[in-house]
Each structure stands twice: as C-alpha cells, then as structure tokens.
Amino acid sequence: TLYFPQKLWKIVESDQFPSIWWSEGGKCIAINEELFKEEVLGRAGPPRVFAMKTMKSFLRQLNLYGFTKLPRDCGRSASLPEFLAEEAAASAHSQILHYYNPSFNREHPHLLQKCKRR
C-alpha cells in the first residue's frame, strides 16, 4: 500500500485531477479546495484516493506529514498553466491553498521517502 505522501504525489503528478497541481515550479502544491472536495475526497467506489472524506481530515494529514500552509500570496505562479488554473479558481471564488514540504518536490522524487509522519 502507498502512504499518504506517495498517494498525494501520484495525484499531483496525474492529469486526472485538475483540483491539485504543482506550484512554485514544483516546490509547493496548490489545491483548489472546492473542486478537490468534490473530485478527490467525494469519490466513492474503487478509484477512491484517500480514506478520508473531509477537507479537515485531509489537511490534518498534510500537517501530520510536515506540510506547512503558505500565505496566499507566496508569489504568483511562474508558469502559465499554474497561473491560468489559479485565475480560473479565483473567478470561481474557490479558495486556493498552497502547501509546502521540503521533502515534497517535483524535481527531487527521492526526497519523498523523508516525508514521514510526525
């Protein structure tokens, strides 16, 4: 079985979930909260990603694994797709959450094994 950080990595890397993506050039993850609740946490049946069903539980997991929430303007996204995703979310009045973990970096997948539960 995959642990929470590995599952998270899989969905961030996958194109299947527009509600979560790499931001800050792969150093952070950005989550469109409303869409994520529906798309990832609201899934029933076999393709379910996480055991939890609420955003609160999901954010608790992030915190347990050492992710820190970044202030809303930790810098605008550099890449166009990121920027567009954030603009689209902003126009839909969805909250975009940014989380950072030094061991969760798109450029350095080997660091993932350091993502341990506190």
Image: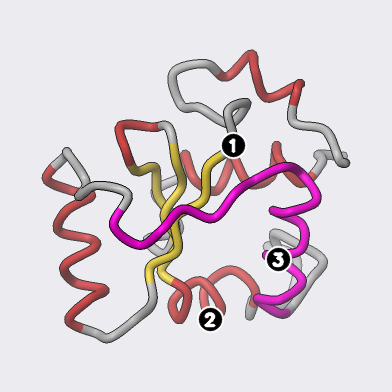
Labels 3 and 1: the sequence-earlier one: 3
Q: CA distance from mark 1 to mark 2?
A: 24 Å
Point out the stretch of residues depicted in magenta: 54-73
* Identity, as a three-letter code, of the amino acid under mark 2: Glu
Category of crowding for the residue at label 3, using alpha-carbon neighbours closer than 10 angstroms: few (below 14), some (14–19), many (at least 20)? some
Q: CA distance from mark 3 to mark 2?
A: 13 Å
Q: Secondary structure at mark 1?
A: loop
Mark 2 highlights which residue? 38
Answer with left or right where residue 2 lies relative to residue 77.
right
Q: Secondary structure at mark 3?
A: helix
Category of crowding for the residue at label 1, using alpha-carbon neighbours closer than 10 angstroms: few (below 14), some (14–19), many (at least 20)? some
Task: Tell me which residue sits at (54%, 55%) in the image.
Answer: 69
Vertical position of residue 107 compared to residue 7: above or below: above
Q: How many marks?
A: 3
Answer with left or right where residue 63 lies relative to residue 109.
right
Mark 3 highlights which residue? 58
Q: Position of residue 22 (x, y in %)?
A: 39, 42
Label number found at residue 101? 1
Task: Tell me which residue sits at (58%, 68%) in the image.
Answer: 40
Q: Is residue 115 magenta?
A: no
Location of residue 88 (image quadrant): bottom left
Location of residue 112 (image quadrant): top right
